[in-house]
Image (cartoon, coloured by chain):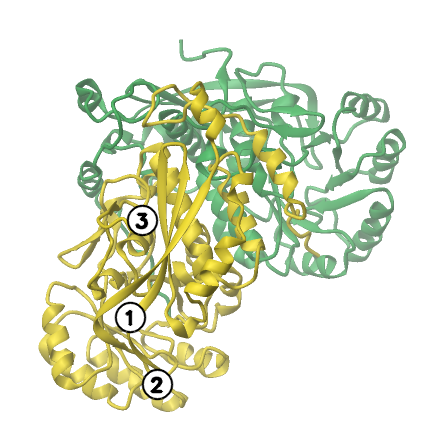
Chain colours: A green, B yellow
């Protein structure tokens, strides 16, 4: 028998009362810390959320086992508090069910001004999550903006707030989509600086794809099947063949509901089998132990940084491999994920490199390695302000 | 197949290199933030650890099912970095195997000056943990001092750094030890402000203890058996009887190794069965799901705040009840635990109230509720400086 967590959000007036009880602490140094004595801040200290739709243009058409597209809709969020501004992002590839319309509908329901203190992160995000089910990317856009804001108020990058070592970031993979041989060769050439490549499988020419890439480079490969396989024995033979070709893990081989085949493959596979479509949020991970070797955690699927942190720690404690992924995103979303990346085994944080119209500048890939900026919060600069 | 977390501590020179790569960021406002330009800080920025043994005097002799004592040895740690000072504590009740001698031996092996940046919390604590096995309280004393230091550098309490709401702290129980009826009555009278009382059982007069307390107060009770029961059917009958007397949970009924009887009792009990002696660190929790309903997490057993935070999140995600406990401690250790208490279902944070020679002032119990100070870090003031 377990006792459920005390529910606190049946009445939003409680939130206001709770928030007002929080003492504002700190020095009177403007720009770097909290300001106890600044009357302007005390009077106007409210969270103001804005959002703008934006369309990402992809450098190459993005082909999965089930679809192909050249753009990704995103919603950019801005959270203001006194003189500080945090930015977030919802990236919404259409197959996940969110859109500019659903995100705007969700965000319009939020009233963050009931919170007097942005440091009430757990309460604020619990409130955001309680407003409507689903809307994972829209929720993440608020989580990201809030974390960016907090980091800017404290004037430290998020990795510092979390006690992480920026020298321990992993290499990121670069994704080679399913395509014609010439295009694949061109993409591999473009990816020459990367220390690990991710090849999308589940099409009709899986072995050809791998052979083309393997002939051109010695770096380790990983593969993402995107639920494309059906037969467990063929899958195991393929995994064994992939291992010989330098592949180090396999993502989502079967349909996300197909636990039997997945557990069998995981038990017999010489490579780790990583959940992607089969994992959404923290609550999904306990049930995946014994089915998959690990999980691919994405901010846009799990509602953001706070839940991602909990997922990483849970999966790690459960002895699972941890991977951090992304959608096609601006440097805002990718840099946010990068802040957590010192905690993970593998990163697939190339989403900003796949677009031609980024509006942020943030984390960089330096000789294949995720490289964090020393800027506060998520660690980005705005290079095109779409709110103007 | 799972891939182990990349090991980083085979060579401590790596740490130094990693640390030096960390950019020092922030404003030039002294006292509240990080100081990029202050040459004195840049030159002397090293972590300096000191420690002093201290003996806590208990107001009442402390009687468990297996022992009785009137003092508790503690080691107070001090961690200095530039103009900031953090304090920590190792509380070492003798039955757990640590002592002034073992703690001094352990702490003397640490060389924290290899870390150029105290914000490398994960690296620093991984290093501390790698120096020797066990020494849980000694490790916690470093974790506490480091967190206190970080909070003081940022000039915010730890609950703010973790995004927690100080209004959501739980009531704390107050412990009534096994004793003669008159002493028990005196203790219950002293505990009149508390909203939940914890009664130690496992002696020869369990029902008498409960009846005495229950006659004197209407507040909910919880019981800690400290491994004192042997028979599952007698235990279940006792749990059913306890529920009628207003008991809300039962801690550690059987020997910590006795998983069969515990799992059977948990499956049949009308009250949550909470692990205490059966849980030490994060790695223990996955195996307790299905055996216990929940866990009692103590900083002195789990190596400190960082691991406790991970344990709380893991247990919560696994659907387990979460309790936060303590040893007899100064207000340093208890206030540290209190910073995490907005995340838990139950708190047993009365350790500082059981001693007569506290050297810190910090969290208070106000009308039975854990009440956090707005001071930075762990939230304490030194009221007697034993380092002078």
The residue under label 3 is B339
The image quadrant that residue B71 belongs to is: bottom left
Label 3 resides on the chain identified as B
Q: Quadrant of the N terminus of chain B?
A: bottom right
Residue at image location 63% in from the left, 19% down from the top: A355
Depth check, front residue: A228 or A172? A172
- Residue A49 percent across, percent down from the top left: 33, 24
- Work out whether mark 3 precedes mark 1 in sequence or the reverse, and give the earlier one: 1
Contact? badges 3 and 1 (CB < 8 Å): no
The residue under label 1 is B71
- Residue B385 percent across, percent down from the top left: 27, 48
- Residue A387 percent across, percent down from the top left: 41, 13
Label 2 resides on the chain identified as B
State which mark lies toward you, 1 or 2: 1
Depth check, front residue: B244 or A158? A158
Depth check, front residue: B38 or A95? B38
Q: How many residues crowd around disc 1 within 10 Å: few (fewer than 14), some, or many (20 or more)?
A: some
- Badge 3 marks a residue whose secondary structure is helix
In this view, B324 is above or below A126: below
Contact? badges 2 and 3 (CB < 8 Å): no
Depth check, front residue: A124 or B99? B99
**Which residue is the extreme one toward the top?**
A388
Residue A344 left/right relative to A267: left
């Amino acid at each position: 028998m377990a006792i459920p967590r005390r529910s606190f959000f049946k009445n939003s007036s409680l939130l206001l009362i709770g928030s007002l009880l929080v003492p504002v602490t700190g020095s009177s140094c403007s720009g770097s810390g909290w300001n106890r004595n600044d009357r302007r801040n005390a009077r106007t200290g409210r969270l103001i959320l804005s959002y703008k739709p934006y369309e990402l243009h992809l450098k190459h058409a993005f082909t999965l086992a089930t679809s192909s597209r050249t753009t990704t809709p995103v919603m950019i969020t801005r959270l203001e508090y006194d003189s500080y501004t945090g930015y977030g992002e919802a990236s919404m590839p259409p197959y996940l069910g969110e859109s500019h319309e659903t995100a705007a509908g969700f965000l319009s329901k939020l009233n963050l001004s009931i919170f007097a203190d942005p440091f009430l992160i757990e309460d604020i995000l619990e409130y955001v999550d309680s407003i409507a089910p689903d809307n994972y990317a829209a929720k993440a856009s608020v989580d990201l903006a809030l974390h960016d804001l907090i980091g800017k108020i404290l004037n430290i990058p998020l990795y510092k707030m979390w006690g992480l070592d920026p020298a321990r970031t992993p290499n990121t993979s670069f994704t080679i989509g399913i395509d014609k041989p010439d295009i694949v060769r061109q993409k591999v050439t473009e990816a020459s600086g990367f220390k690990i490549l991710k090849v999308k499988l589940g099409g009709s020419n899986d072995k050809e794809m791998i052979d083309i890439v393997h002939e051109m480079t010695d770096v380790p490969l990983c593969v993402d099947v995107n639920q494309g396989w059906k037969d467990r024995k063929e899958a195991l033979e393929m995994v064994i063949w992939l291992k010989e070709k330098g592949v180090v893990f396999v993502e989502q081989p079967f349909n996300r509901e197909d636990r039997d085949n997945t557990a069998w493959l995981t038990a017999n596979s010489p490579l780790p089998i990583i959940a992607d479509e089969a994992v959404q949020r923290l609550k999904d991970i306990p049930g995946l132990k014994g089915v998959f070797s690990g999980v691919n955690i994405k901010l846009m699927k799990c509602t953001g940084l706070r839940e991602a942190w909990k997922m990483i720690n849970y999966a790690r404690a459960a002895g699972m491999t941890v991977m951090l992924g992304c959608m096609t995103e601006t440097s805002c979303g990718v840099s946010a994920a990068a802040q957590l990346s010192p905690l993970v085994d593998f990163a697939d944080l190339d989403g900003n490199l796949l677009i031609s119209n980024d509006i942020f500048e943030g984390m960089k890939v330096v000789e294949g390695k995720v490289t964090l900026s020393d800027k506060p919060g998520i660690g980005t600069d705005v290079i095109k302000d779409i709110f103007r």
